Image: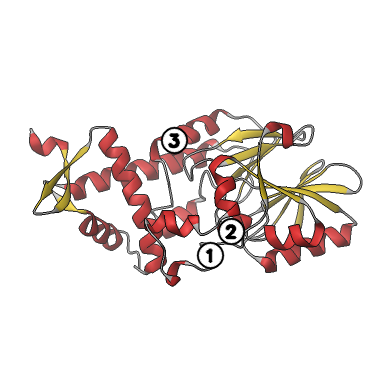
Amino acid sequence: MYELVQAAGNSYYIQSPAKIGLVRLNDTDVCLIDSGNDKSAGRKVRQILDTNGWYLKAIYNTHSHADHIGGNQYLQNQTGCRVFAPGIECSFTRYPVLEPSALYGGFPPKDLRHKFLMAQESRAEELTSDCLPEGIEIIALPGHCMDMVGFRTADDVIYLADCLSGKGTLEKYQIGYIYDVASYLATLEMVKMLKAKLFIPAHTEPMEDIVPLADLNIAKVREIGEGIVRECGTGTCFEQILQNLFDRYGLQMNFEQYALVGSTVRSYLAWLKDCGRVDVEFDHNRLLWKRIDFEK
């Protein structure tokens, strides 16, 4: 773990729970794509930099989830590097309490205010193409979260952040976190059209052909969507839908999973309602979700 791997030319990644990209800008200067999950990850990254005699100029965050920005504060304080994050993700990086607040839908209890959902704040600036070194391009990857991006380097290596999961992760967790299902599916279809020397997703192994894995992720999203439609039936409350999904996929409920999976299921329901697959009714002060075809 935390081994430096050369992907191609000046493009590297650091093997870690969420892969950290590293791009050499010249003989001494480098930038990072994400920073790991906490201060400890930041320390390990710093050791790699020191061992190679590299100076960290900037961290380019793909999105604001804690496992991707957790090393920001330590590295920024140690090196004086700049931190950039895209769109709304920049605000979440500056004010990390927004992450568990968004998941929970209100002020989060202490059970959700921990380093896995709430990183330490960093002095982030908004990412634009003008902030990037020559040869690095932004690729918009919305869906997993609000404004996630990836990056293509001059070596034709693409860092894909969390826009898809590996087969093992899909089988283990089943319902991966998604903020906007329609955008997520559109992103996966777009990724299938990309050509690159190497694709580096954050949570599975690098690969030259991304299409099979993208198709696998698309199929899983559609499977989950169809399952939620069935659970709605003639009128089912959200908590019952959530419980049934946990039971069906053999998931174990705790506060963190309630927030992550619960937020995702709400996003699925919003997508399905916008697509005309489900609707709502209010019965005895309860919001019930129901399949549209039950009305016919």
Q: Are marks 1 and 2 in contact (CB under 8 Å)?
A: yes
User: For the residue marked with disc 1, what is the amino acid?
Assistant: Phe
Q: Percent from the top left, x then y, of residue 81?
A: 78, 52
User: For the residue marked with disc 3, what is the amino acid?
Assistant: Ser
Q: Nearer the viewer, residue 54 or 207?
A: 54
Q: Is residue 192 visible?
A: yes
**Residue at the location (89% across, 42% down)?**
26
Residue 100 in the figure: left or right of residue 283: right
Q: Which residue is mark 2?
A: 67
Q: CA distance from mark 1 to mark 2?
A: 7 Å
Q: Which residue is mark 3?
A: 183
**Residue at the location (82% across, 42% down)?**
10
For label 2, count other residues whose C-alpha is less than 10 Å away and answer few (under 14), some (14-19) or many (20+).
many
Q: Percent from the top left, x then y, of residue 160?
A: 60, 42
Q: Of the residues under marks 3 and 2, which one precedes in the sequence?
A: 2
For label 1, count other residues whose C-alpha is less than 10 Å away and answer few (under 14), some (14-19) or many (20+).
some
Residue 74 in the figure: left or right of residue 85: right
Q: Percent from the top left, x then y, of residue 91?
A: 56, 48
**Residue at the location (38% across, 53% down)?**
175
For label 3, count other residues whose C-alpha is less than 10 Å away and answer few (under 14), some (14-19) or many (20+).
some
Q: CA distance from mark 3 to mark 2?
A: 22 Å
